[in-house]
Image: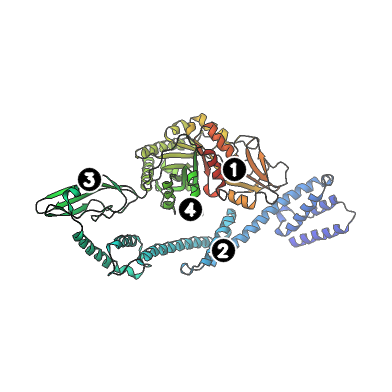
Amino acid sequence: MKEIGILALCLIVIFLVGCQSETPKAEVDLLIEALPEVSDLTIYHQHQITMIREKIDELDDKERALVLEANLLRFYELETRMAVIVLEEENKSIALNISVLIASLPTVDNFTNNDEKTIEAIDRSLDSINSDYLYLIDQSLLDQYELFKTTLKNYQLDLAAAKEVNQLLLNLPTLDDFTLDYQSLIIEIDQRYLKLTPSQKQLVNGEILLLPYYQDKIAMLLYLHQEEQEELSFIELSSLLDELNNQEVEDDVELPVAYQQGSVQLTINWQSNSAAISSAGVVKRGLLNTNVTLTAKVQGEIIDKTITINLVVRGTRVVDMPTINPNKKLTFAYFRNPAYGTNLMERDYMKIDVLNYAFGKIVNGELSVSHLSNLEKVLKIREKGVRVVVVIDGVSTETVKAFVLAASTLENRQKLANSIANVLEQYQFDGVDLDWEFPSGTTQKNNFTLLVKEIREALDRSSRDLILSAAVISGSYSSHYDLVELNKYLDYLHIMTYGMSGSYVAKHQSALIRSTYAPYAIASSVEMYANGGIDLNKIVFGIPFYVKIGDVAGNPTNVLGASLTNPISISNNLFMRDYYNKNGMVEYYDAEAKVFYSYNGTKFASYDNPTSIRYKCEYAIEKGIAGVMFWDYGHDQEGGTLLDAIYQQFKLK
């Protein structure tokens, strides 16, 4: 029947082409009237819909006014339905492609570099498909794909771990050529091998079987070394040990094994109460500072004395952070786990004061960061003076539930607070940021305050100055937060002043000043929280580094306030590459809201650029607040343009 209807419509088109006397208005009416009902519309009618749209657009105002209003309304309804049908067909095609690609994957042990492109193609397709159409893909295939990626990752990790040991084994000399210069290499091989899992050990070369022989050779050489060690006089020994006492060390310590007092030969036997320094003076640095007591038992024919030395082995994670300058506005950078494909650039270290590392998770009521794939690399930037704060995830339904449960009782609150303090100490984080979106209702509101209080008390037991901050909504706070109480415990309050316009309307997502097309804005949010009880020097507002973009129908002259369809968020870098000043995109400035947007008749984009960021930073300076934060680092333009715009305003001159 659909084919018959399409044939009839085509016959009408042919008839109209032959009717030279027919008016364009009458032609449009006939074409619209020939279209099927909405319920009978299929993808096969797409060409007819497009043709009618072109003819309507060709009509001048007088001709368009003559077209039957009912026909126009019916056509608009059919045109909207056709857009939905096209979207459905596109997603069906994507779903089929995903299924085919997953089925084509090899086994893990046959995986090659060429298969990486298949993985990338599957991930891109999964990102692009509308979530409403995921049901078109067999769930077992999706489960198979996730299992494949996990298995592949584990195999590659095993291979990488074994490769590190194999590389060290290549550096070993023969037993005949072995000296104590290779002692640290043997220790490193042994320690690394012991840390390997059984599956990783199977990938290590056979030379590892010689390790016990090398260890025996070390023991023998150490014995000979003791015999050859220069004997020290008692005064020299005492002086040397006085210099060592209470020192902080990172490298191996040379411990004397004998000394001479007159003609008396005395021996020194060292004992250590910690694995951080061996009795031979070999230092093994842990993650944190370790207090070590070394005991020297000095023996001879006459004297038998004990000398005690206290040393501190400096931890690899221990960094003396500089004091925060009260005269400088702070820049807080939200940075998602590098598994998202973004790495921190060295050029940006000096431009960031605090890196909010997302996300830690609440697991069984305690903070966990074990899933963060590049944690150690991120923590290394602390050596550049950048504070690293772990952000606790409270965005999804499950992570919100974890927050609600953790805050529900005193026992649960103390459990989470203590675990946070332990994680901050273990990894040397500089603080914690609570991203609970959002406490709802009186009970959760009160429990959140009590949780913040417990965390503050737990952090204050540390000898370090640790940051406690929270991300909060930009709108009305009264049902979510007790600001007067929170002000007592929080160091910073991060107002998420982005995404404030809603998804389906062409308005500014992060305006500085409230306006006709920006009912919510940064300045009004800051005023609201300041008036609610938060100190200005604790307030931080947010700047989006991402772009809100979507489609607009009807080519309105003034796009602001128009309906937006297919809204998505993309990185500023992607926007500049694919949209900015392309395909008719023109940038506009809303002087009332002090923000920019772009529009080309069919697409609308709301975003920040260096100029709008300058206005926002100037406002932060003028208002006297703590600074700004942005979400997120990975969305910046190539070269870090947006971060640099903040830095140029906040750097001390």
Horizontal side of residue 150 vs 591, given as left or right = left
* Residue under label 2: 99
Q: What type is the residue that disc 4 sits on?
A: Pro
Residue 199 visible within the image: no
- At which x and y percent is residue 514? 61, 34
Q: Disc 3, disc 1: CB below 8 Å?
A: no
Q: Residues within 10 Å of mark 3 (few under 14, many from 20)?
A: few
- The CA span between labels 2 and 1 is 43 Å
In this view, 330 is above or below 140: above
- The CA span between labels 3 and 1 is 58 Å
Choose the circle earlier in sequence order: 1 or 4. 4
Q: What type is the residue that disc 3 sits on?
A: Asp
* Residue under label 3: 242
Q: Name the secondary structure under disc 4.
A: helix
Please state which of residues 317 and 439 is positioned toward the viewer in this rendering.
317
Q: How many marks?
A: 4
Choose the circle earlier in sequence order: 3 or 2. 2
- The CA span between labels 4 and 3 is 47 Å
Say which of marks 2 and 1 sits in front: 1
Say which of marks 4 and 3 sits in front: 3
- At which x and y percent is residue 381? 44, 48
Choose the circle earlier in sequence order: 3 or 1. 3
- The CA span between labels 1 and 4 is 25 Å
Horizontal side of residue 504 vs 306, given as left or right = right
* Residue under label 4: 338
Q: What type is the residue that disc 2 sits on?
A: Ser
- The CA span between labels 2 and 4 is 28 Å
Residue 610's label in the rendered image is 1
Q: Name the secondary structure under disc 3.
A: helix
Q: Residues within 10 Å of mark 1 (few under 14, many from 20)?
A: some
- At which x and y percent is residue 229? 20, 58
